[in-house]
Image (tube, rainbow, N blue to C red):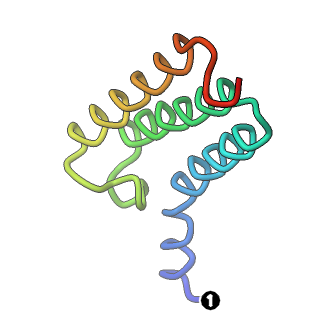
Amino acid sequence: MTVSQNNGTRAQLPFAVVMLIVAVGIVRISLYHWREGTTEIGMALLLASFLRAVLPDRRAGLLAVRKRKVDVLLYAMFAGMIIFISLTITGGPFG
């Protein structure tokens, strides 16, 4: 593995961490803990928003889709919507 390949792999670490949290949330949802699972997915998006805000473009990896301000705003808005919905729905899909 060359140095440039290693740097490219390291640049995807923030995205991998976010996706790992999303995967845990999906597992929790499949185990009928839908409220906790969706909240974890929302928290993963909040983490993505934070990481996109603080990391330079070359280190943000696949979290950098658009301009920084747009990415941060959209990740935070989707996180807020998901967390709000998961905490306010009564009954739920598996209840």
Residue 33 point in image, percent of width and height: 75, 30
Vertical placement of residue 24 versus 33, above or below = below
Residue 84 point in image, percent of width and height: 46, 16
Residue 49 point in image, percent of width and height: 40, 35
Give the side of residue 51 with respect to residue 25, left or right: left
Residue at 29% from the left image edge and 36% from the top image edge: 74
Q: Amino acid at mark 1?
A: Met
Q: Which residue is mark 1?
A: 1
Indicate the quadrant where residue 69 lies: top left
Q: Residue furthest bottom?
A: 1
Give the side of residue 12 with respect to residue 26, left or right: left
Residue 81 point in image, percent of width and height: 39, 23
The local crowd at label 1, few if under 14, some if 14 to 19, many if 20 or more residues have their Cα within 10 Å, is few
Vertical placement of residue 78 versus 85, above or below = below
| Quarter the N terminus occupies | bottom right
All told, the count of numbered labels is: 1
Give the side of residue 29 with respect to residue 45, left or right: right
Residue at 51% from the left image edge and 55% from the top image edge: 15
